[in-house]
Image (cartoon, rainbow, N blue to C red):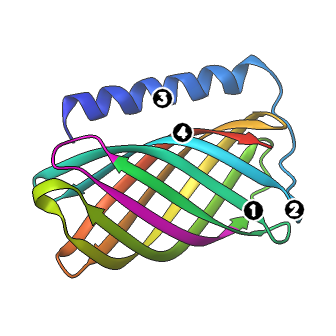
Amino acid sequence: MTIKKMQCLVLFLAFAASLAFSAEAPTVAFKAGDFYLSPQLVGVSAGSAGKFALGPNVEYFLSNVVAVGGDVSIYLVSPGGLSLFPDIEYHFNVNVRGLDVFAGAGPSLFVGFGSEGRTLFGGKAFGAARYFFTPSTGVFLKLGIASNKEGTAGLWAIGVSFKL
């Protein structure tokens, strides 16, 4: 992990901790029909290469523990590209106020721009934790793995979730 990645992670965790201790955490209770929008910063690393992307994550709850949604990410480095990651998630009941722990998986599609104009199909799986500091706003960290015909890559995402 590079120094800049470590600094971003430490700043995110410090921000989350300051919010966690600034007020009493709300009880996390999802219900069918809840919809969350989460702007996020995504990092993907394959071997010694790494890329950063920005984009939204969406979640629509089918029940109190199952959600469908996904990510749309635009890579910030040349030659760039666009990733689409639809997924299904399971949210665990961890009995900790304000904490949402979940895991998910789904297919992936990468469309490259410029000289990297290729299309790759694959899959991804991830685990994540989100801390709500109000009933409708929280911060999250997601860690996972993605693979396609070119290989396997680690991925992480940090962001803020808003209930709409």
Q: Position of residue 158 (x, y in %)?
A: 48, 41
Residue denoted by label 1 = 60
**Label 4, label 3: how far apart the Cα atoms are:** 9 Å
- The amino acid at mark 4 is Gly
User: Which numbered disc flags the more N-terminal residue, 2 or 1?
Assistant: 2
Residue denoted by label 4 = 159
Q: Which residues fall within the magenta stretch?
A: 75-90
Q: Quadrant of residue 27?
A: top right
Query: Foreground: 93 or 47?
Result: 47
Q: Which mark is residue 33?
A: 2
How many residues crowd mark 2 within 10 Å: few (<14), some (14–19), many (20+)? few
**Label 2, label 3: how far apart the Cα atoms are:** 29 Å
Vertical arrangement, residue 140 with respect to residue 93, above or below? above
Q: Is residue 164 visible?
A: yes
- The amino acid at mark 2 is Gly
- Does residue 78 belong to the magenta stretch? yes
- The amino acid at mark 1 is Tyr
